[in-house]
Image (spheres, grey):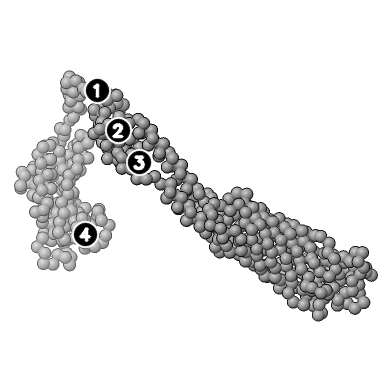
């Protein structure tokens, strides 16, 4: 079985390697990525008068439309110039009798281009290391031609009475090749030819010739891929660096790398060896979905060896998984008796009805009862609460209870004081008559509508109540004046004296 497990482990490692290779088989192409580039190079102009080599610089921004076509916004400055030299002076086209000694015609242009990649017709897989391309474009340019004549004078050339420094249409085309250095950077070499349209196109150097004047720009480009990244795959490139079949070929390679299905379950735990992370668990051992033996209490001892599979948490366990729990420090019987005796000695519940109770008794919870609107009759649903109050008083014959009546905010203050008094009196009468509670142990208080539980001016059930509390030296309040006149009193037998 050891040989079988070793062979299986090798198979799984090989499978992982193949699937990893398939995953990185090709970059993730994306049309969301842009290319930003800077360039510099040699600028010359082929015209009627010989040129002198000069320089050019520029910037561009490029975006893919698909694997073959992309668009580019290109801006350049070409410092083109020339002189008659040993060939002798050239007659100025628009200035009779003037001979040109030298010319200076820098060209600034902004053009839009369509670029066609030439190597994406191949269906072989893998990233492109080079990207040859051709392009055409058109846009606008500004050309300011300065002529110097043989007599030493100079001026800006005019055509038809207009200054030569003007915006003119320009067309261009060219070829290039880029070399991929990394997934984010490549270097390109490019040759671009530009010409100005219109009648200006053949006299940029001031002398009319047989052919249209052409600007040539041979340049080196440093290109950077920006935006459109994929955090799950760092190999993200613009579409022109990958072929249209790359993604399909990567999927095919991943399918080929997958192992053949093998239902073998060596340890018989219900998880086949292809997915079993513990392919040698003992027979009968319970396992999870990955084939790993269960450890229900997480103590490091698998259940099939654990004599206490549900050990109490927080304690160390022995080699059999049994928790090592220290024995509790129980009190002995004499110690318990001593504690009880001490507590009883501190308890003194003897006091008169008007004396302050022993600390803690005043905090006892006693229920409250509620009343219907404009009524002082005790509701049958509150008989149970009054029974609880009576039982507490019977069990503690030394305590007295303050009984305080309350109302809601409907009607006048005088009316509500009388109504709250009657409610407290009704509760006291119930306790005295039904449970034989000594009337002297019940201290009647009333509060009217001053202390509401729910702060609202409308009728509210929670505010119509009687509360009970252990007395702490309170005295009974005298009955209020008879002030039960209200619109709510009319016809209500429970609302008056």
The residue shown at (56%, 60%) is 121
N-term mark: 1 or 3? 3
Q: Which residue is mark 4?
A: 460
N-term mark: 4 or 2? 2
Can you tell which of label 2 and label 1 is closer to the viewer? 2
Q: Quadrant of residue 150?
A: bottom right
Disc 3 to disc 4, C-alpha distance: 71 Å
Q: Residue 12, percent across and down?
A: 40, 39
Q: Which residue is mark 3?
A: 274
Can you tell which of label 4 and label 2 is closer to the viewer? 2
Closer to the camera in the image, 244 or 193 = 244
Please tell me how crowded label 1 is: few (under 14), some (14-19), or many (20+) other residues with Cα within 10 Å. Answer: few
Quarter of the N terminus within the rendering: top left
Can you tell which of label 4 and label 1 is closer to the viewer? 1
Q: Does 156 sit left or right of 357 as displayed?
A: right
Figure check: 185 above or below 200: above
Can you tell which of label 3 and label 4 is closer to the viewer? 3
Q: Residue furthest bottom?
A: 160
Can you tell which of label 1 and label 3 is closer to the viewer? 3
Please tell me how crowded label 2 is: few (under 14), some (14-19), or many (20+) other residues with Cα within 10 Å. Answer: some
Q: Residue 319, percent across and down?
A: 29, 24
The residue shown at (80%, 67%) is 46
Disc 2 to disc 1, C-alpha distance: 36 Å
Can you tell which of label 3 and label 2 is closer to the viewer? 3
N-term mark: 3 or 4? 3
The residue shown at (12%, 44%) is 388
Q: Residue furthest right?
A: 151
Q: Which residue is mark 2?
A: 281
């Amino acid at each position: 079985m050891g040989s079988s497990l070793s062979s299986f482990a090798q198979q799984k490692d090989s499978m992982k390697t193949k699937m990893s290779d398939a995953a990185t088989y090709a970059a993730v192409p994306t049309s969301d990525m842009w290319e930003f580039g800077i360039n510099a190079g040699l600028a010359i102009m082929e015209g009627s008068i010989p040129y002198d080599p000069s320089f050019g610089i520029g910037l561009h921004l490029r975006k893919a439309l698909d694997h073959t076509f992309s668009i580019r916004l290109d801006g350049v400055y070409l410092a083109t110039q020339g002189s008659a030299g040993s060939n002798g002076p050239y007659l100025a086209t628009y200035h009779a009798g003037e001979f040109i000694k030298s010319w200076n015609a820098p060209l600034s242009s902004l053009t839009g281009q369509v670029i066609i990649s030439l190597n994406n017709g191949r269906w072989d897989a893998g990233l492109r290391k080079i990207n040859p391309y051709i392009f055409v474009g058109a846009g606008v340019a500004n050309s300011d031609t300065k002529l110097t004549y043989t007599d030493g004078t100079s001026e800006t050339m005019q055509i038809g009475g207009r200054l030569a420094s003007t915006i003119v249409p320009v067309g261009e085309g060219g070829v290039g090749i880029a070399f991929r250095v990394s997934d984010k950077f490549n270097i390109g070499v490019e040759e671009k030819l530009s010409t100005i349209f219109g009648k200006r196109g053949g006299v940029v150097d001031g002398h009319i010739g047989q052919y249209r004047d052409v600007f040539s720009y041979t340049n080196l480009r440093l290109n950077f891929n920006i935006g459109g990244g994929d955090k799950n795959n760092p190999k993200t490139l613009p579409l022109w660096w990958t072929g249209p079949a790359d993604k399909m070929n990567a999927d095919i390679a991943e399918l080929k790398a997958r192992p053949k299905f093998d239902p073998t379950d060596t340890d018989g735990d219900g998880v086949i060896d292809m997915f079993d992370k513990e392919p040698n668990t003992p027979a009968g051992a319970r396992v999870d979905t990955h084939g790993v033996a269960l450890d229900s209490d997480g103590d490091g001892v698998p259940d099939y060896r654990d004599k206490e599979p549900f050990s109490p948490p927080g304690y160390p366990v022995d080699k059999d998984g049994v928790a090592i729990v220290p024995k509790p420090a129980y009190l002995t019987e004499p110690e318990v008796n001593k504690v009880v005796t001490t507590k009883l000695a501190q308890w003194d519940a003897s006091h008169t009805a008007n004396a302050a109770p022993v600390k803690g008794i005043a905090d006892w919870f006693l229920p409250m009862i509620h009343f219907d609107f404009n009524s002082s009759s005790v509701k049958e649903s509150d008989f149970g609460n009054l029974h609880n109050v009576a039982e507490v008083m019977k069990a503690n014959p030394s305590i007295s209870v303050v009984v305080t009546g309350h109302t809601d905010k409907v009607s006048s203050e005088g009316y509500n004081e009388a109504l709250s008094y009657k409610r407290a009196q009704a509760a006291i009468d119930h306790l005295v008559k039904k449970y034989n509670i000594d009337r002297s142990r019940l201290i009647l208080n009333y509060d009217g509508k001053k202390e509401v539980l729910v702060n609202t001016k409308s009728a509210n059930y929670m505010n119509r109540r009687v509360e009970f509390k252990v007395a702490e030296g309170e005295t009974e309040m005298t009955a209020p004046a008879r002030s039960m006149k209200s619109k709510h009193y009319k016809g209500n037998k429970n609302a008056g004296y």
